Image: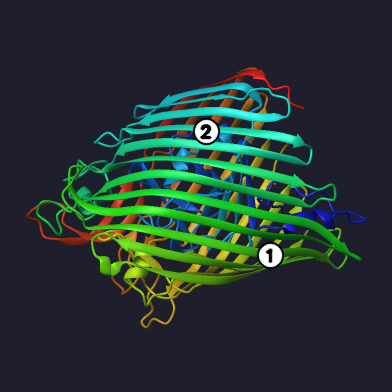
Amino acid sequence: MLSTLAALAQEKPPEIPRVRTSVVITGTVVEPSVDQRNQAVFQDTLFSRDDQIFHQLAAGINAGQHEGGGKSIEIRRFGFNLDHGGVNGGLKVLVDNVQQNQSTQGHGQGYLGSLKSLSPELVQEANLINGPFSAEYGDFSGLGVVHIRTREFLPEQWTARLQGGSFHTQRGFLAYSPDLKHHDAFLAYEGSHSDGPFRKPLQYRRDNVTGNWTRRLSSLRSYSLKLNGGRHGFDSSGQIPLSEVAAGRLDRFGFLDPGDGGRARQGVLAGYYRQESSRGAVWKLDGFVSRSLFDLYSNFTFFLNDPAGDAIQQHDSRLQQGSNAQYTRPHELASLHGLFAAGANFHASQINVGLYPRIGRTPLGVTTQAHARVTNGAGYLQDAITLWHGKLQVSGGLRYDVFRFDVQDRVNPRNSGADVAGRWQPKLNAALTPWQRSSLTLHFNYGRGISSLDARSLIQQPAEQRVANTDFSQLGVAQRWGRVSVSSDFFLINRSHELVYVPDDGSLEFLGPSRSHGFEAKTSVQVTRHVTLHGGLTKVLNAFYRGTAPRAYIDRAPHFTMDSGLTVARWHGWSGSARLRAISRYRLNGEGEDFAVASGNTVADVSVARQIRRGLEFHVSVDNAANRRYFETQNYIESCPRVGLPSAWGIHATPGYPLTLTMGVTMRFRESQRP
């Protein structure tokens, strides 16, 4: 909300502008807790995996691909490992206000696998809130929010993209956006295939269909329908023990279990309504229903527990419903100007989740199976006002979430039950610009975020906490000099409980309260109208469990994350970017002096697009341009890689892709005549 007020502060006399039609918040230098990436970031880059979308977002988010890109990415941020997005604070990801984090999922709380149905060409913008600072967002928002908004129409009636490259990679995108009076619409298909660099071909296949239809009843009222459906499947190499690689018995891109892989099917239908008054007040109402099927075939410990193998199948079948309502209204009293917001959210999931031992992809029995219902309702209020002749903007909010967990265990009925939990979440933001002639801004942000517990773990551990808190404080400064923007801040994060996923039974376990603190720095330079430089780093000074002696440290997340890039936009028909991302080495176990260390990495990616003629563009993308040897997702576990060998603790890892070349062509026909 402060970005709207910041704009007011620049006017003399200040005026209340019409409220923007999007529910997501966009940011400027006076609100550095919010970053924005527009469609230009996505439209000129060739994508083949969903982790590449997060590489574009940067913002201190380190995302590592799992098993060649077929499984959901692993998220690491602010010194915490969020697993697949939903634990240890969580990173909330939404697409058009539809939550992507899946609670009580077959492979981890807050699983983000649904992002595989997102086609990058359809992204309009992505807004990133650095922490739990907005009352609009609840569960999984402790370490930030990524809100992706897709297009309502495309600028040309027909768009086609064909691309191919290393490792038998092929991808096609086709979209039709009719030119209709009072309507915006499109229908798009994306299909892709890749074998990856692995000795066992990845056979990653993805098919997505996306559509939108918007009816503009007037300049102040409209409604929309959006649909998205996708399927994907893959044969993965899993995470392999690096001791076997070092001994020469296993290739870096090798495998141990030929049955590893997965498949998923998913679909969502959503509706949106917006009504705006002539005085700037806005009502928004949206709702969705989704259906998904998921099976993951994994082997984490190989022959540690069973001479026949420790392979498992993780299953998740779910039906979800959700709705959001929001009312915003600008207001003024004397010299005070502000923006009031109130809203409510509802999300419900009905889930059939199970874990089965297997050989190949044939299940041999049942380890766990449960029917779970998780319901989350919430309401919030937030108001932002400008004071001191526009020099001070203050925003405060309050949110309350209530959860109901209901589990019917089909294997052990004693683990069945129901429970209810609720939590308040206060929010406070302030931005001070002391001098009207200077853009120097001091800012403070505080928010309490929450992350819910897997429903099965809650019923199995009735004495444990139902919802974990994340208290996030941020104090910083921002400055703009013409085309140069700089911001930096210090952060302090206190969490009530850390959660660790236990793959053996699909549960979560608590490891106690924790703390992380450090600083961030970001800069952006508009070199010319066509050339931009940007860079950012996050440095965690310490991350540890509170109340431990000797001190136990938080593991499995880097303490240094950096990203930088050079972007060229529409310069004599050329567009492109060169990006560099890096993370430090980090602990993989948190206690004692003898600890395992994950290797860091530095990776450079380059993309170039050239307009051959109107409606025809040629693209080249090079990932890992320096061909660095590195590992993405790394864990320290006990395993036995071969029958007859003694078990041992060691690092298991997923190799990063080597130099990967992708070339493509984009064709656009019949430019839209929309006003």
**Snapshot quadrant of residue 500:** bottom left
Q: Amino acid at mark 2?
A: Thr
Q: Which mark is residue 381?
A: 1
Query: How far across and down, in percent of the image, does residue 474 sit?
Result: 62, 67
- Residue at 75%, 54% (x, y): give it: 480
Dot 2 or dot 1: first in sequence order is: 2
Q: Is residue 159 above or below residue 564?
A: above
Query: Distance from label 2 to label 1 (Cα)?
Result: 33 Å
Closer-to-camera residue (451/421): 421
Q: Which mark is residue 210?
A: 2
Quarter of the picture containing the C terminus is top right
Q: Which mark is residue 114?
A: none
Query: How far across and down, in percent of the image, does residue 487 sit?
Result: 67, 58
Disc tally is 2
Q: Give SS at disc 2.
A: strand
Q: Is residue 209 left or right of residue 282?
A: left
Q: Amino acid at mark 1?
A: Leu
Q: Is residue 182 above or below residue 648?
A: above
Q: Are marks 2 and 1 in contact (CB under 8 Å)?
A: no
Q: Is residue 437 left or right of residue 431?
A: right
Query: How far across and down, in percent of the image, does residue 573 sit?
Result: 65, 24
- Residue 516 in view of the camera: no
Q: Is residue 185 above or below residue 433?
A: above
Other residues around mark 2 within 10 Å, as few (<14) / some (14–19) / many (≥20): many
**Snapshot quadrant of residue 353:** bottom left
- Residue at 59%, 59% (x, y): give it: 137
Quarter of the picture containing the N terminus is bottom right
Q: Give SS at disc 1.
A: strand
Q: Is residue 74 left or right of residue 39?
A: left
Other residues around mark 1 within 10 Å, as few (<14) / some (14–19) / many (≥20): many
Query: How far across and down, in percent of the image, does residue 61 sit?
Result: 51, 53
